[in-house]
Image (cartoon, helix red, strand yellow):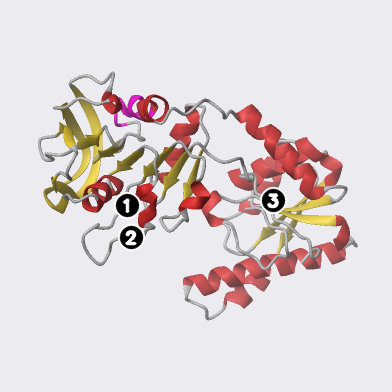
Amino acid sequence: MITQKSVIINYMIKQKIPQIAVVDFGSQYTHLITRRIRQLGVLAKIYLPTVNPQELKGIKGLILSGGPNSVYDHTAVKYNKKLLDLKVPILGLCYGHQLLAHHFGGQVLPGKTKEYGFAELNLIGKSRLIAGLPRRSKIWMSHGDSVAVLPPGFIALGKTADCAVAAMADDKRKLFGLQFHPEVAHSVFGQTILKNFVFNISQAKKDWSLDEYFKQIEINVKKIVGSRKVFLLVSGGVDSSVCFALLEKILGKERVLGLHIDSGSMRLNESKMVKAALAKAGFDNLQVVDASETFLNAEKGVIEPEQKREIIGHTFLEIKDVVMKDLKLKKSDWVLGQGTIYPDTLCLDLKPNRIF
């Protein structure tokens, strides 16, 4: 560890309360949903299905993502049922659509046709959710189950050749469900639907932009780092490179040191290419260490993925300590920085300040 008050700095730094909360039921598109909402200028954030509704206090709308499971059997995702009691508009997508139907008294069954790919949505009802859509439009389907019986209070808004309830709504309670994915580009009017939900139904206001986001990152980084410097683990991928650039822009090049570690699992000559590419981009404060033998010995005989992942994570930190010692860096003067993807942050034993 660097200090007892070490911290991992991820460029997805803690933000203010979102207006739109996205509950993740395992969809490959969950992060795309939040991206689409942010493209509208509104802050959205992802939460687990078991989240305490108290953590969502202040939100204007709730979106339930898709997922690969079935709502009616043992594979159903455990969720906090109080989420669906929140007095905010709710939009269910794919699995979320089926969950709404199941929760409020409808029936979900295996579909006669398992759909994956383009379909044509035919509108058969009216709602603010589908305002501005033509009677027929292309959508993207990906599901095995379907809503067979609508819950009380709901009406069907649209259908396809193989899905009788491709869209449904209870406008009075502001509950909406779509069997298709409006967040993907294949659904031609998907962004219109999301815009209707975010602004016309949830009454959200524009409160997010990249410029404002950077200002918040700058404030947080300066607050956490203080007068110290940042020792950053750099893989050379997008996430760590963006983190490298942000830290240099905020703190200055002299206060950031990058470390690229060759773990022995790299592509042929990848570490050399990473060093050359970052140097070309102006990053001349990067140390490159070949620790292939150390990693391969540590992982020898281990086949369980999670155990191997933990070994790799701790080995990176051990190598980092060796490099700091070799460079004669005083640990108390440094903060550990890590740029990684949002759902894959390494949960290391840091005390007590962590930002993920």
- On whether residue 159 falls in the magenta region, the answer is no
Circle 2: is it few (<14), some (14-19), or many (20+) Cα within 10 Å?
many
Give the residue pinned by disc 2: 77
Label 3 SS? loop
Q: How far apart are labels 1 and 2 at the CA level?
A: 9 Å
The magenta region covers 186-194
Indicate left or right for 253 with 16 as reference: right
- On whether residue 189 falls in the magenta region, the answer is yes
Circle 3: is it few (<14), some (14-19), or many (20+) Cα within 10 Å?
many
Whether 111 is drawn above or below 219: the answer is below
Contact, CB < 8 Å: mark 1 with mark 2?
yes
Instruction: Give the camera-side residue of 312 and 182.
Output: 182
x then y, percent, for residue 320: 75, 63
Q: Amino acid at mark 3?
A: Ile
Say which of marks 1 and 2 sits in front: 2
Circle 1: is it few (<14), some (14-19), or many (20+) Cα within 10 Å?
many
Instruction: Identify the residue at image location x=26%, y=44%.
Output: 97
x then y, percent, for residue 5: 78, 61
Contact, CB < 8 Å: mark 1 with mark 3?
no
Label 2 SS? loop
Indicate left or right for 2 with 290 as reference: right
Give the residue pinned by disc 3: 9
Q: Amino acid at mark 2?
A: Val
Count the marks.
3
Give the residue pinned by disc 1: 67
The quadrant holding residue 136 is top left
Q: Earlier in the sequence, mark 1 or mark 3?
A: 3
Instruction: Give the camera-side residue of 197 and 330.
Output: 197
Q: How far apart are labels 3 and 2 at the CA level?
A: 31 Å
Contact, CB < 8 Å: mark 3 with mark 2?
no
x then y, percent, for residue 194: 37, 30
